[in-house]
Amino acid sequence: MDAATRRMIEERHVGGIIFFKPNLQNSSQMLSLSNQLKKANRDNPLPLWLSLDEEGGRVNRLPDEFAKLPTNLKIGKANSTAFSKQIGGKIGEVLHGFGYNLNFAPVLDVNSNPDNPVIGDRSFSSSPSRVGTLGVATLQGLAEQQVIPVVKHFPGHGDTSVDSHIGLPVVNYGRDRLDQIELVPFKKAVQAGADAVMVAHILLPKFDDTYPASFSKAIIGGMLRKDLGFQGVVFTDDMTMGAVAEHYDLGDAAVRSILAGGDVVLVCHDDAKEQAVLDALTQAVKDGRITAERLNESVERIARLKLKYGLTDKPAPGADAVAFNQGVASLLKRYLP
């Protein structure tokens, strides 16, 4: 907890905090940090999202005392919904114990391009149906532990040759291809009641040749909300990634994301950029560019989701790393002999 974070909570009233590997050193520090953040938020009307990317495999944020989880690709090869759901449950159990209540997972990208520099073994499979089935099982396991799953990266980051952390990937497919491959897992997740979706920084020129999906009205308002019927909370991917930062003004991109039908703008690094985005959004409301009606739609979706999962700023008790490790070892022995 530092002065900048305290100001963001107490003065700017941010909706949540995201954690990365360097922020979580061990069980004791992890619990202390989450409880400090909860305490700082006690005068705000809604509890904080305390979030991270705990996918398993190479994308994990838990301290080293916790057992490493298998990649989604290994889970996909086992092709067991029970295994996938139990992995989601184990992640949810440990996160919930420490007060962390939102996980940017599971990954629903289809591993359709072996040269993809960013997805690869983060995907369950090259089979769209298998990705959808196992992804839904994982999100159900998380949700049962009162951890909000956020499926990603809509409308599909699996067939890109550029890492959106660095540059802006371009996907030149039309709707027929997307309906056959990329959108299949997301349709399954929406039909299964997914509560939250993260939208990727990828440009799909056949739908919008100016703005990436993360702030495209055609993708968020059209494809996701209208066509797929998704009524839940829409998060952007981190707006400080190269795909946005190298090509667009950060404040304008944030405003456009809300105007496109998004609800939560994710700004992971750093304080000055976070302040700039909040200022841009505030000014857009004052200017009438973001109407009260548009703002209230998002506020209601966010509030409903936080209430649905019983989020609280009460201190968390912690979780037992030894018990977690034993549970993971048992699962791996059963499903990945």
Image: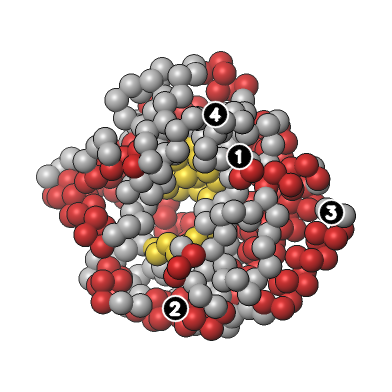
Q: Earlier in the sequence, mark 3 or mark 4?
A: 4
Q: Which residue is mark 3?
A: 335
> Is label 1 or label 3 in front?
1
Name the residue at 46% across, 57% down.
304
Q: Quadrant of residue 322?
A: bottom right
Amino acid type of the residue tagged 2 in the rendering = Leu
Q: Which residue is mark 4?
A: 159
Judging depth in this view, the residue of 319 and 243 nearest the camera is 243
Name the residue at 52% across, 41% down.
118
Element type where label 1 sits in the image: helix
- Report if the CB atoms under discs 2 and 4 are less than 8 Å apart: no
Q: Residues within 10 Å of mark 3 (few under 14, many from 20)?
A: some
Element type where label 3 sits in the image: helix
Does any portion of residue 42 appear in the rendered image? Answer: no
The quarter in which the N terminus is drawn is bottom left
- Report if the CB atoms under discs 1 and 3 are less than 8 Å apart: no
Q: Which residue is mark 1?
A: 120
The quarter in which the C terminus is drawn is bottom right
Vertical comparison of 109 with 4: above or below: above
Q: Residue furthest left?
A: 287
Q: Residues within 10 Å of mark 4 (few under 14, many from 20)?
A: many
Count every numbered label the image shows and give the total.
4
Name the residue at 22% across, 46% down.
251
Vertical comparison of 118 with 277: above or below: above
Q: Which residue is mark 2?
A: 33
Amino acid type of the residue tagged 3 in the rendering = Tyr
Amino acid type of the residue tagged 1 in the rendering = Gly
> Is label 1 or label 2 in front?
1
